[in-house]
Image (cartoon, rainbow, N blue to C red):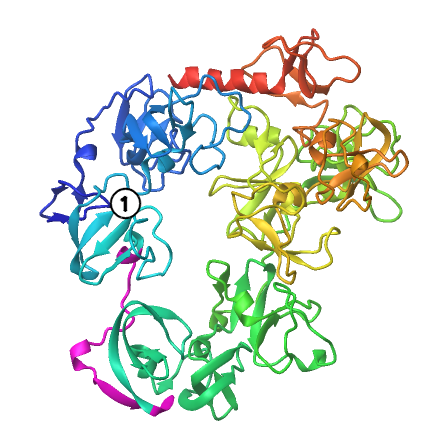
Amino acid sequence: MLLLSQSCTGFSYSCDLCEHEICPRCVSIPNPHQHPGHKDELTFSDISFEGKCAACGDGIYHEKAYRCTDCIHYGLDLKCLTLPLAARHRCDKHILKLVYYDENDDLERPHCDICGERRLLNHWFYRCSICNNSAHPKCALGKYPFIKDGSTLSHKNHPHPLITVKKVSNLKSDECFECGDSCQDLAFWCETCCSHAHLECLNTKTLKTERNPDELQKEINHPCHRMHPLSLKFHNKYNFCEICKNKERGYFYGCSPCNFGIHIDCAFPSLVIENKTHEHPFNLFWRQGSFICDACGTEGNYASYICSTCHLQVHKKCTSLPRIIKTAMHYDHPIFHNYFVRESDLDQKHECRVCYKEVKKEHGCYSCWRQDCKYIVHVNCAIVEDMHWIIDSENQDEPSDNSVTDSSITRVIEVNESGEAEKIEHFSHGHDLMLGDKIREEDDKCCDGCVLSISGLFYYCSQCDFFLHKTCAELPRKKHHWFHKHHTTLESIATFLLKIEATESPCIFECRFCLHVCSGFFYCCSDCDLKVCLRCASIPHAHQHSGHKDHIFLNSEYKGKCTACGCGIYHGNAYKCKDCTDIYALDYACLTLPLAARHKCDKHILKLVYHDENDDPEQHYCDICEEKRDPNYWFYLCSICDNSAHPKCVLGKYPFIKIGSTYLNEDQEPRLTFTKKIGYYPKCFECGKPCLDLTLESANSVCYHFNCVLKNYSKYVRERML
């Protein structure tokens, strides 16, 4: 029988002094090590490597990596260092070989042929040289590549021997008996229990009760079910508890005629609960049927806890609700828990600022401590894992406002009569900026921050082509966004590269949410690899979009089609409507489409339209690409000329790279400028094809496709690595 050792089956080296076990693959790696993916020798170091793995792009958090002494930013974690050079997968009948760099990559967002999601450029992948299929290493190898199919092993959290099964489609049921989800990759089959489970469920399994089953009564009379006695049972699949409403596998008390069951811990709860969040003790109170919890306003069954002094009835979990918390959704001020809405606000109807459903005045909620702030949320909307922090009220007489107020404007030079800053210094630009409100329509200038057309008040540079919306110029330099647990910093490409002392990066970035390649400002996190454009950063958790009547909410688990374009949302993070019977969901790319845009096909401004009211099929064509368009998907329309077009045709492939900005890569000469050619299309110096979209032009009028320049840059980086 083989013992499970760090998700591997097979031999392992173990230490008698500690419980560490190492697989033979890791033991066989010498130090230093010459890997075929890098030209220089790599040396193992347990000193913190503050960088990312060159193979997969993930941060090396365990502080142990093989690094190159000559290339200070090149490091490999042990997981990637031990990747097999060849592998097989059922999607391809040939052998897939590990590739360190794709010389033939056309940079058209290459996708993995197994999962369909995008592959990251310059990261390792597997490819079939015959079929030209490519795949992420995790997709080609699976989640557990070093667990042999059919191996027998023992696990501390299961009493019987387990057999590894990598193909579970031939089983009667592929549901994990721990979590109930389907076992898609690897299952552990128990012949005694006639069921199987995920490895991660076995590893993280915690017993519902620590009571010894031999000491439990075989049959009990319980106040929550007086009609029949409850018998002690064991269930391999997880059963529903009528009290806590959770599903667990293991021992429980149940009544077969009534299909009624409760977990062991729910059958014998604590009689009295005392904690510092409430000044009086809570006493257990059994009742027949349901009740409404005074702390959170949701329904509970059978077992409640009451405070006879305050006349409260709450769930067991609500007896320990924190009194004061901070939430990522409302980071500026702390919020307090109350058992009813404040008396001064009783005449108003309140909506939860997270789910936008009504907050009942007679039930508990969280609200902002400041009288001038009307922020209010349901308890279950505020208490979200990793999105709230408890504040110790004993050490804090009054919650302080910890919002970050660092301004992007480094100095105000002149102020006009109305008190507005008329002349400023901004962190992103070397010259002084002046306030303006008018721009010639034919100029079509765009903001260097959000890369959208200039409108309203803006700041401009009198010495160069630099513009900023007033709202973009006044953005806080440091900010805590609701979607991220760390503080983020506002950066421009130039200041960001200067900060990290980098000259080997093209001066663009890819937004984590909309996946657009951009040249404007972005919020980044110093603790993790997060870069978010200003358009996506401005979207709130609950968003009222002009294309839909109801609020739409972030749903990171949604995997379906976008209502606006019909494309699949593979990376999650969709905004979805909770109230619509038909699924209404938008990805970030469509959610942040500009409401108005320009194109050379029309002298007027094109406006974004969400549904075509014209029933004539002959009108359902794009006037730019002349292909048919679906009238149910969003498009741009000129109401004067009646021209209509796909959003991708109007905006182009790279809509958020500013025309006229300079490609700042110091290692590439001559310096290049982003342009769009209208009227004539010069040939690309690199590939010889016409430059129809975004073009990079040198001072001597030599033109390149943006893709060709990126491809050359990727080759340059590869040569430096090898």
Q: Residues within 10 Å of mark 1 (few under 14, many from 20)?
A: some
Q: Which residue is drawn at 63% across and 41% down?
A: 589
Reply yes or no: does residue 602 show up in magenta: no
Report the number of discs. 1
Question: Which residue is disc 1 drawn over?
Answer: 166
Spot occupied by residue 3 in the image (x, y as percentages of width and height)? 14, 49
SS class, disc 1:
loop
Identify the magenta region.
201-227
- Residue type of the residue flagged with mark 1: Lys
Q: Confirm whether residue 699 shows in the render.
A: yes
Q: In which quarter of the image is residue 21?
A: top left
Q: In which quarter of the image is residue 250?
A: bottom left
Q: From this view, report whether residue 111 is shown above or below residue 215.
A: above
Spot occupied by residue 585 in the image (x, y as percentages of width and height)? 62, 51
- In the image, taking residue 242 as reference, residue 425 lies left or right, namely right
Reply yes or no: does residue 212 show up in magenta: yes
Q: From this view, report whether residue 557 is shown above or below residue 506.
A: below
Q: Residue at x 41, y 21 (%)?
A: 101
- In the image, taking residue 187 as reference, residue 397 lies left or right, namely right
